[in-house]
Image (spheres, helix red, strand yellow):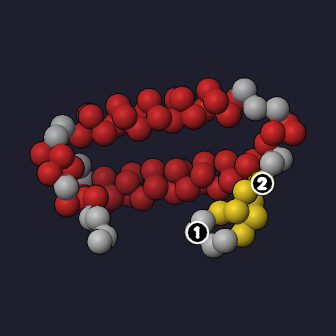
Amino acid sequence: MKILWAELFDTKTAPIQFSLDQLKAIHGKLVYLLKGLSSLQLKKTFIHPHNNTEVSLDENIGTYAWHGRHHFAQIFNLIERKGW
């Protein structure tokens, strides 16, 4: 069964600030964790489930950072386009 996250009750009814606070906390904790890793630890690899390829942690961090900036740009462009 596929879950449509954007269709869940809390997504449609809860204040957006809940989600923004949660995202801020998750990213803050993640940054704190990643800053504590050594260069050797950042070179460790794993099999990425999306395309079943071997990826180093530092490469994946870069991709994740790009992805976040990409989403931010999409949101910013929507705000500009809609005049919000």
Identity, as a three-letter code, of the amino acid under mark 2: Thr
Left or right of 40? Residue 22 is left
**x and y, in percent, of residue 12 in the image:** 15, 51
Q: Residues within 10 Å of mark 1 (few under 14, many from 20)?
A: few
Q: Residues within 10 Å of mark 2 (few under 14, many from 20)?
A: some
Snapshot quadrant of residue 24: top left
**x and y, in percent, of residue 63 in the image:** 65, 56
Left or right of 43? Residue 55 is left
**x and y, in percent, of residue 79 in the image:** 31, 53
Left or right of 39? Residue 84 is left
Q: Nearer the viewer, residue 72 or 59?
A: 59
Left or right of 7? Residue 36 is right
Q: Which residue is mark 2?
A: 45
Kindly indicate whether the residue at mark 1 contacts the one at mark 2 (C-beta within 8 angstroms). Answer: no
Secondary structure, mark 1, is loop
Q: Nearer the viewer, residue 29 or 62?
A: 29
Q: Could you tell which of marks 2 and 1 lies nearer the N-terminus?
A: 2
Residue at left offset 29%, top offset 64%: 3
Where is 12 relative to 38, above or below?
Answer: below
Where is 36 relative to 50, above or below?
Answer: above
